[in-house]
Amino acid sequence: MIKGTAKTEAQYRAVTMDSSSSLKEFSQDRKKYYKKYFLGEKVEDKDSSAANMGRIVETLLMEPHLFDDKFYMSSCTSTPTGLMLDFVEALYKVTRDATDEDGKITKDFADISQEAYTISGFKIKYEAVIGKFIGSDAEIYYNEIRTVRSKNLTVVNTMEISIAEKIVEQLKTNSTTGPIVNLVNSARYEIIDQMQVEGYIIDGHPFKSMLDKVVIDHDKKTIQPYDLKCTWSVENFYEEYYLYRRAYLQAYLYYYAMKHLVDNSESPYYGYVVEYLNFIVCDSTNYYQPLIYTLDFTDMTDAYAGFVHKGRTYPGVGDLIAALSWCIETNTWNISHKNYLSNGIVNIKG
C-alpha cells in the first residue's frame, strides 16, 4: 500500500501488523501488548489533553473533511477536569461493563456511581460528589461519551476547537512551519497526507506505518517525511517526548517505510533519496511557537541499536524486534528472553 488516500484510518487500524505504536507499547508494557495485539482484547488508553489536541489539530490541518467522522461536538463549553473527570471516566467504564448485549444496564445507578466514586479517588464524601455531578456539565459529558464512543468518535468542546484552530493558523503562518504545511501539489512537489505503507520488513518482521505528511520533490528526487506532534513542552521535546514516549522508534520505522518504497523497482519513487524524519512540534496551549526537530545519522543508529541518556537505557528497534519475535514464536509473554536465558536469576544492577 503506497498512498494513504486509498484507505481510511479505520481500515488502516484494522490491518493486523505491528507499527511503531505497537512496538513502543511492547517496549513499555509487554502485558498490555499481549492483551491488545496478540489476544485482540480491547484495551482503552487514557489520552492526555495534549494528545487529544494533537488529533484535533492534525485533522483540521490535514483532513478537515473528516472532522465529523472522528469527533463529536459537545454541548458543554469545557470538559470536566481533575477528579471529576476521573469520576466521569470511571462511571463510563463501569456503566459500559454493566450493559448487556441488548443495551440494557444491569446495575442500579447507585451501585455504578459508588463503584466509580471508589475508582476515582475522591476524598470528599460520595454524596457531595453526586451533588456536584447531577445536573452539571459533567453529567452531560458522561451521557455524551456513552453515546458516541461506541461509534469511535471523540467528544470535543468549543474551547478545544478554538485553541486547535489557532494552532493550525500559527502552523500555517509561522515562518518555519508555514512553507511546509502550506505546500500543495505541483509539477515539482507531490504532497501526501496520512501516507500509508504496509508490509515493509525490518529484521524479518513486517510493519505498517501511517505518516502524517510526506513531501516528494520530483526535481531533486527526494522524499521528506514529517510527523506532527502536539505537546505541552515544545522547547524540551527531546526529553519530554522523543525519549519519554520513545518517538525515536517511530523515526526509525518511518524512515524505513519510505526506504521500502524507493528500493522497490515497481514504485513510482524507485531510486529517490529518503531524508530522515522531521518532527513538526506545536504547543497544545498555543503559547510557544512551533519548532521543527531534525534527526541525523547518529540518531538513527541509536534508534536501532539502543542508547543510554543520563544513566537510563533506551532499547533500540533491533533488540525490541528480537525480543518480540521470541515472545511470538514461543508464546512466552510473562518473562523476557534475557531473564528466561538466565533461568530467572538476575544481577541486581542488571
Image (cartoon, rainbow, N blue to C red):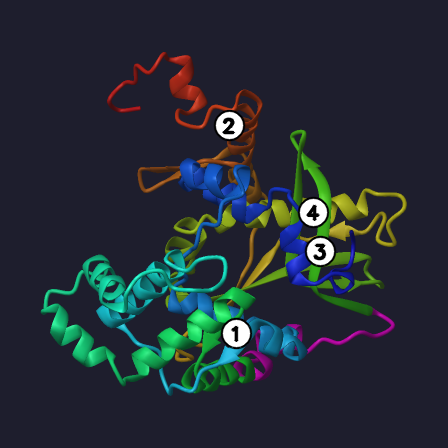
Residue 89 image offset from top left, x and y in percent: 33, 65
> Is residue 316 one of those drawn in magenta?
no
Relative to residue 76, is residue 295 drawn left or right?
right
Q: CA distance from mark 3 to mark 1?
A: 20 Å
| Most foreground residue, 121 or 291 | 121
Residue 349 image offset from top left, x and y in percent: 26, 24
Label 4 or label 2, whichever lies nearer to me, is 2
| Range of residues picked out in magenta | 170-188
The residue located at (84%, 43%) in the rendering is 264
Would you name the residue on which mark 3 appears?
196
Sequence-first tag of 1 and 2: 1
Q: Is residue 135 visible?
A: yes
Mark 2 Cα shell of 10 Å, populated few (<14), some (14-19), many (≥20)? some
Q: CA distance from mark 1 to mark 2?
A: 35 Å
Q: CA distance from mark 4 to mark 2?
A: 21 Å
Q: CA distance from mark 1 to mark 4?
A: 25 Å
The residue located at (55%, 80%) in the rendering is 168
Q: CA distance from mark 2 to mark 3?
A: 26 Å
Mark 3 Cα shell of 10 Å, populated few (<14), some (14-19), many (≥20)? many
